[in-house]
Image (cartoon, grey):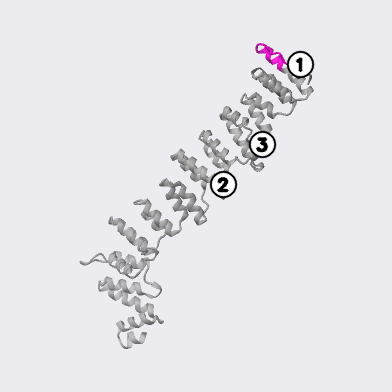
Amino acid sequence: MPYITNTLSNPELAFRFAARTGCTGAEDVFRAQFARFFQAMQYKEAAKVAGDSPQQFLRTSETIERFKQAPAAGQPPPILQYFGVLLEQGKLNRTESVELVRYVLGIGRKQLIEKWLQEEKLECSEELGDIIKPQDAMLALSVYLRANAPAKVILCFAESGQYPNIIVYSKKVGYQPDYIYLLNNILRINQAAALEFAQKLLQDESGPLADVKAVVDAFVQRNMVQEATSLLLDVLKPNRPEDADLQTLLLEINLVAAPQVADLILSKEMFSHYDRNRVATLCEKAGLGQRALEHYSDLASIKRVISQQGHMMNIDWLVNYFGTLSVEYTLGCLKDLLQARTRHGGLQYKLPVATVSG
């Protein structure tokens, strides 16, 4: 190569030889040829040299900057000539793609980006999507998808209201987003959509995709007790022992915020693994004396409920309830009941002797 260049004084031949063989010294020849064309303002020819350079060593940000700063001298902008040549040759690299997209967005030619994406002329990256997003979020989404940038893809789905796609996409690419964070964001924007999103999270065929308690808590914190109850009822249908804590949580939420709903749930006898003592205490506090008695098993608690709330209970129900207790318990409770009803206007009911005698 030095012989052809120096002895024969034929740099053009040296360049063709270097381009064909890629032998040692080729980079120096390409660099020199590029410089000659560039200094002569033969920008297309210089761009072709850069595009053909071994391992594309001339296709760098420094080369791009030289074309951006070069004088046009009556020609089309040198940077456009450079990119035009490279696009004819094939696909741009990451740096070139970013610089070209930034340039065409600046001159209002967004449609060119769509064309180049369809032709697979651009190397998609998260950075490229970030540049496009302020002007076209959906076009940016297509870039993020091609670039395999799951966090940005999910953000675009959330911002555009495509909530079901978040789950479908995440499962497809094996990505685990922070579903609770997303749910809280959706709750601030669209509560109906948030409920639908939560249902999909908890009812996925592979099992819940997020912690059930955390999902429910997101709704409870916003006083959306009805929605939280609906979610839990769906999850707890099988009445599994391992869901004991969730059964307790469901009853606890409603005993605090909606006792009538809790009373209805308990009346249906849907669950059997919850913390009975905890539920009994909450029933007593909520004024559901009969439900509290159904759950208490110690005499002290039973007598306390009867003493404080017995005057409000249905006598027929109490008669049946006493029939489930031992004679000792029944006699002790009857005394408290009589005292309670006397304080509140009298018993006004004749208890069967059989009930007292057991």
- Is residue 139 shown in magenta? no
Residue assigned mark 2: 208
Residue 283 percent across, percent down from the top left:
64, 27
Q: Amino acid at mark 1?
A: Val
Q: Earlier in the sequence, mark 2 or mark 1?
A: 2
Question: For the residue marked with disc 2, what is the amino acid?
Answer: Pro
Q: Quadrant of residue 39?
A: bottom left
Q: Position of residue 159 (x, y in %)?
A: 42, 46
Give the numbered dot on residue 353. 1
User: Residue 27, relative to residue 72: is it above or below?
Assistant: below
The answer to whether 71 is drawn above or below residue 219 in the figure is below
Q: Which residues are magenta?
A: 337-354
Q: Nearest the camera: 20 or 244?
A: 244
Q: Does the magenta-highlighted stretch encompass residue 339?
A: yes
Of the pair 157 and 42, the residue shown nearer to us: 157
Name the residue beneath numbered marker 3: 272
Q: Which mark is first along the chain, 3 or 2?
A: 2
